Image (cartoon, rainbow, N blue to C red):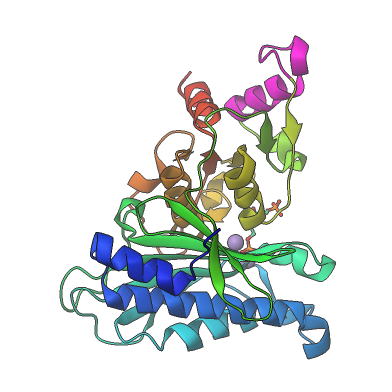
């Protein structure tokens, strides 16, 4: 079975789809950053980088040392890309402008370490990224609709390190080969089944949920004798990358909805570097991604650390949840 490297895959795509070589260079830099972050994670006990960094980010979260290390590596490695104009990171309050933006330059949005509460218990974590284009010379607007993303992906640092990528034409999964460090195409054409019997939500928030989410979960939990007529399984990793990756592999629905406790913040997950990239990946794999009320990719961001409710995954379940929100 042929398993082209990421470079070969992107080069082939550039011929078929006229991808800009500068975008390919940027994706290669992002992949290098993910490889380096993965190595830091695996060596954290030796490098003394487990535990807290001592500071907090703009969302009021205590930063882990590896949140800070991963952010620094992303910025250092991706700054190598000559057409990269700006970085928007979960861990940095302000936008980092690397150059005066020119039309066609790139904007990189990233969550350098997703699921960082899992770090000290050695469970799967990841990195999430998204790329948009500068429209006009001097345009410093990073608040783009998710539908404007030209590339999005994530790395999962699990038993194997994988990079899952969309350039707006389907979703492909690359595994990092131990030894060479090459990302090679092992999971081409990822496709989320439309139907599923598995959901993912932090059920400890049940008492905060709104009626549509309670109804949905209650019906799933009722099993074969309930209104769904079948048993549902539940999983929650507390790492969005791991939970979404499972959905890409075998279907499912993921919810981090608006609830009574997070409504004032707008939700929990961040629009530009968590929800939007995952929404593009899920749609490109045949799934749906919604706030419950609207398609995520249609939202017009108001601020670069904005939070948003997220419901995504298998089409039938997301459509059902949207229906429950309308009634
Ligand atoms: P991050 O580690 O980048 O701050 O993201 C954590 C997010 C996401 O990965 C996960 O789905 C969610 O927070 C888990 O939240 P709970 O701890 O409330 O379950
Ligand atoms: Mn965080
Ligand atoms: Mn995250
Ligand atoms: Mn993070």
Residue that appears at 47% across and 40% down: 291
Q: In the image, is residue 58 above or below residue 308?
A: below
Front residue of this view, candidates 156 and 308: 156
Q: Residue furthest front?
A: 1
Image coordinates of residue 268 in percent, x first then y, are 58, 52
Q: Is residue 260 visible?
A: no
- Inspect the magenta stretch and tell me whether residue 295 lies in it: no
Residue that appears at 73% across and 35% down: 206
Q: Quadrant of ligand 2?
A: bottom right
Image coordinates of residue 192 in percent, x first then y, are 53, 39
Image coordinates of residue 305 in percent, x first then y, are 47, 64
Q: Residue furthest left?
A: 136
Front residue of this view, candidates 110 and 306: 110
Image coordinates of residue 135 in percent, x first then y, are 19, 68
Relative to 99, 67 lies left or right: right
Q: Is residue 164 visible?
A: yes
Residue that appears at 49% across and 71% down: 5
Type of secondary structure dominating the magenta stretch: helix
Relative to 211, 310 lies left or right: left
Relative to 242, 24 lies left or right: left
Classify residue 219 by image quadrant: top right
Quadrant of the snapshot with the N terminus:
bottom right
Residue that appears at 49% across and 86% down: 77
Write down the region rendered in magenta: 211-230
Classify residue 103 by image quadrant: bottom left
Front residue of this view, candidates 55 and 47: 47
Tally of marks: 0
């Amino acid at each position: 079975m042929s398993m082209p490297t990421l470079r070969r895959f992107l080069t082939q795509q550039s011929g078929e789809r006229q991808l800009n070589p500068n975008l390919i260079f940027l994706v290669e830099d992002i992949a290098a950053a993910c490889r380096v972050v993965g190595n830091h994670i695996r060596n954290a006990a030796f490098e003394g980088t487990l535990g807290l960094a001592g500071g907090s980010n703009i969302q009021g979260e205590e930063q882990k040392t590896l949140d800070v290390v991963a952010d620094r590596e992303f910025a250092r490695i991706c700054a190598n890309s000559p057409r990269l104009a700006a970085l928007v990171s979960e861990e940095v309050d302000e936008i980092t402008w690397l150059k005066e933006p020119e039309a066609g330059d790139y904007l990189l949005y990233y969550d350098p370490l997703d699921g960082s509460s899992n770090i000290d218990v050695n469970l799967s974590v990841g990195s999430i990224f998204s790329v948009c284009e500068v429209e006009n010379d001097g345009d410093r607007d990073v608040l783009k609709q998710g539908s404007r993303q030209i590339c999005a992906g994530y790395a999962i640092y699990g038993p194997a390190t994988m990079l899952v990528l969309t350039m707006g034409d389907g979703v492909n999964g690359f595994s990092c080969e131990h030894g060479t460090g090459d990302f090679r195409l092992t999971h081409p054409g990822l496709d989320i089944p439309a139907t599923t019997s598995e959901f993912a939500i932090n059920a400890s928030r049940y008492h905060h949920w709104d009626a549509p989410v309670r109804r949905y979960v209650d019906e799933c939990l009722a099993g074969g004798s309930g209104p769904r007529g079948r048993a549902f399984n539940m999983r929650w990793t507390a790492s969005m990358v791991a939970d979404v990756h499972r959905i890409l592999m075998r279907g499912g629905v993921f919810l981090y909805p608006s609830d009574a406790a997070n409504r004032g913040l707008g939700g929990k997950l961040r629009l530009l570097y968590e929800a939007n990239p995952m929404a593009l990946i899920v749609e490109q794999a045949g799934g749906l991604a919604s706030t419950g009320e609207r398609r995520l990719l249609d939202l017009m961001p108001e601020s670069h650390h904005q939070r948003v409710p997220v419901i995504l995954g298998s089409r039938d379940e997301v459509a059902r949840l949207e229906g429950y929100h309308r009634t």
